[in-house]
């Protein structure tokens, strides 16, 4: 006998909980996770901007519950999601002397900080627990559900990463109040994506209330329904395919042509946020659908009008560059193991995958997007 087979599985179990006013001293949700004992300690990794805005409340909270906390600040923004930040954080975890199991790292911030913390947690002692507290709309509706972590590397988004879910996620939409309008609109790009690819009702909500949601910074009565529908949609897609064994993923809608373009735009006069880049990819995919006789002109009109109402871009010069789009799609295809697997809506809220998209079509769609912008 000189062959052995090891066959085991990794149970995954994490809760995503809406917990309003999470840092009110009357709310002890956050301290329900991790070991409860005297002299409790926590390592708290916070986005610098969030710390400036909320430090008093957050520190007061831990003080109230007698939890000794060490704070590590990280900067948000895509350009800061890098190896330096990851290494810095790993050294801070070492300095803190983190227990292997009972002291979950608490990550508070936008998608960038949450992804760096998740990555560090997956690597430190080959894995320590962490809790996610997203403070941006995009973090609340998207990063909250995901098992993925990562950092950018060699100008490629999330080129280094892992599947390493948190042990708990707490959502408090109050944080959105202090986000600037550009970032909120960017978060709405991911919601719009979800709506077009699989949830017609969500699209109608955005069509009707999009502007008000933006103006009230999601403190509108309809915001809970919009957030919940987005999260449920994500859970439906991710839970059955958490390790991405199946590379046909509806949630990849908006992420086929955009990744390289988003990174390239960062140091230009006109940088794209993640949600903006995703939106342009969504519009691009909708035009592919229309040119193939699937989405109607009326539906495309509604999609463009809603995008505009959400203050999301309808055009960016880099999305008019067919060579760059081709490069981006080729890179995406490596991620999809050589296949295009392009999610394309057949109507609003229902999609299919295509694998026969041609370069000539790409040039045509670039022209159409440009023309729409010039009109
Ligand atoms: N892990 C996943 O599956 C997953 C899913 C989606 C997106 N992401 C990642 O998320 C990132 C984008 O996240 P993001 O849009 O939250 O960007 P971000 O984390 O860069 O935050 C955007 C800006 O908002 C600031 N900010 C954060 N919270 C704030 C608040 N409450 N008030 C005021 N300012 C605040 C930050 O300091 C930053 O300047 C991308 O790197 C993307 O890859 C990861």
Image (tube, helix red, strand yellow):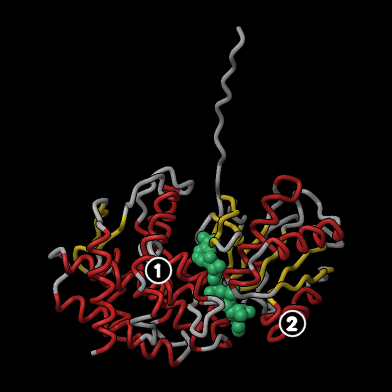
Residue 375: name its quadrant: bottom left
* Nearer to me, 300 or 19: 300
Judged from the image, the quadrant occupied by ligand 1 is bottom right
Task: Name the residue: 57% across, 39% down.
Answer: 10
* Residue that mark 2 sits on: 55
Residue 230's disc is 1
Residue at the top extreme, as displayed: 1
- Quadrant of image for the N terminus: top right
Q: Earlier in the sequence, mark 2 or mark 1?
A: 2
Query: Residue 168 in the image: x percent, y percent?
Result: 60, 59
State whether residue 320 is above or below residue 374: above
- The picture places residue 201, in percent across and down from the top left corner, at 27, 72
Q: Name which residue lies at 56% across and 50% down.
A: 163
Instruction: Give how far apart the Cα atoms at labels 2 and 1 are.
Output: 29 Å
Asked whether residue 327 appears in the rendered view, the answer is: yes
Residue 32 falls left or right of residue 360? right
Q: Is residue 72 above or below residue 149?
A: below
Image quadrant in which you'd find residue 289: bottom left
Q: What secondary structure is marked by label 2? A: helix
In the rendering, which numbered label is found on residue 207? Answer: none
The location of residue 317, given as percent across then percent down, is 39, 79
Residue 73 sits above or below residue 168 on the image: below
Identify the secondary structure beneath mark 1: helix
Q: Is mark 2 within 8 Å of ligand 1?
A: no
């Amino acid at each position: 006998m000189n062959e052995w087979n090891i066959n085991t599985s990794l149970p995954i179990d994490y809760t995503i909980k809406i917990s309003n006013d999470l840092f009110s001293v009357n709310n002890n949700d956050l301290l329900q996770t991790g070991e409860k004992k005297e002299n409790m300690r926590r390592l708290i990794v916070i986005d610098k901007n969030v710390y400036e805005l909320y430090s008093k409340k957050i520190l007061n909270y831990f003080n109230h519950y007698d939890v000794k906390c060490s704070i590590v600040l990280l900067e948000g923004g895509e350009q800061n999601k890098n190896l330096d930040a990851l290494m810095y954080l790993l050294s801070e975890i070492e300095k803190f002397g983190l227990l292997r199991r009972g002291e979950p790292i608490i990550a508070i911030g936008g998608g960038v900080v949450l992804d760096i913390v998740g990555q560090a947690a997956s690597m430190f002692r080959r894995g320590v627990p962490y809790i996610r507290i997203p403070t941006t709309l995009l973090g609340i509706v998207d990063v909250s559900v995901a098992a993925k972590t990562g950092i950018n590397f060699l100008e490629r988004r999330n080129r280094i990463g892992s599947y390493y879910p948190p042990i708990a996620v707490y959502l408090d939409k109050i944080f959105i109040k202090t986000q600037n309008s550009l970032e909120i609109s960017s978060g709405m790009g991911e919601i719009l994506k979800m709506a077009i690819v699989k949830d017609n009702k969500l699209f109608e909500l955005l069509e009707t209330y999009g502007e008000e949601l933006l103006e009230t910074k999601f403190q509108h009565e309809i915001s809970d329904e919009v957030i919940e529908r987005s999260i449920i949609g994500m859970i439906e897609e991710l839970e059955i395919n958490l390790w991405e064994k199946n590379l046909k993923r509806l949630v990849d809608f908006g992420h086929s042509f955009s990744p390289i373009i988003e990174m390239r735009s960062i140091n230009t006069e006109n940088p794209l946020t993640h949600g903006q880049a995703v939106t342009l990819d969504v519009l691009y995919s909708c035009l592919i659908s229309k040119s193939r006789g699937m989405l109607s002109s009326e539906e495309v009109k509604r999609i463009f009008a809603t995008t505009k109402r959400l203050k999301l871009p309808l055009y960016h010069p880099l999305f008019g560059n067919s060579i760059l789009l081709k490069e981006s799609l080729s890179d995406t295809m490596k991620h999809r193991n050589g296949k295009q697997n392009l999610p394309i809506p057949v109507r609003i809220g229902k999609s299919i995958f295509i694998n026969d998209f041609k370069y000539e079509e790409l040039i045509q769609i670039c022209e159409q997007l440009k023309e729409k912008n010039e009109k």
